[in-house]
Amino acid sequence: MNYSTSDFTLGILGGGQLGKMLLQVTSRLSIKTNILDPSDDSPCKEICSKFTKGPLMDFDTVYDFGKECDLVTYEIEHVNVDALEKLELEGIKVYPDSKTLKIIQDKSTQKKF
């Protein structure tokens, strides 16, 4: 897959400093990048291809955002994992995958891992 085309869209859940660093790379590669973040003051708001304001833990918000993307990633662990699982089942790539996010979200499981 050629990621450097206008046909490919990367979705980032969370628009903080890590998202901004990722955007700096994607802009050099001409990758269309959408951001979902709950804050109007997101560091990514002015430099992404499309900014969506919304709660990261809301199933419908995350799911609807992800349906517009070819690949979804997250820069924060407080994201609705059920929405990511459904997106994966429907063929949307999520990286790291929803299973990894579940481990990260559950600190006791994370310690066992």
Image (cartoon, helix red, strand yellow):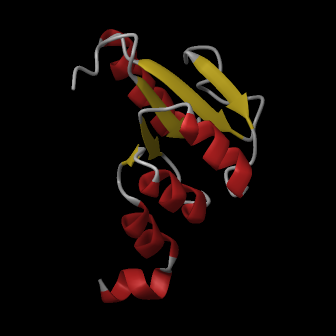
Q: Nearer the viewer, residue 72 or 77?
A: 72
Residue at (62, 60) in percent of width and height: 80
Above or below 109: residue 96: above
For the C terminus, the quadrant is bottom left
Left/right of residue 80 with respect to residue 87 in the rendered view: right
Above or below 25: residue 90: below
Q: Nearer the viewer, residue 104 or 63?
A: 63
The percent position of residue 103, horizontal first and vertical second, equals 41, 75
Q: How many marks?
A: 0
Residue at (61, 19) in percent of width and height: 50
Task: Find residue 31 and report its image quarter.
Answer: top left
Task: Find residue 49 and report its image quarter.
Answer: top right
For the N terminus, the quadrant is top left
Residue at (67, 50) in percent of width and height: 56
Q: Nearer the viewer, residue 94 or 16?
A: 94
Left/right of residue 77 with respect to residue 9 in the rendered view: right
Above or below 52: residue 67: below
| Res 14 visible | no
Left/right of residue 58 with respect to residue 99 in the rendered view: right
The percent position of residue 71, horizontal first and vertical second, equals 40, 37
Residue found at the very far front of the displayed protein? 90
The percent position of residue 26, horizontal first and vertical second, equals 36, 20
Residue at (39, 80) in percent of width and height: 110
| Res 94 visible | yes
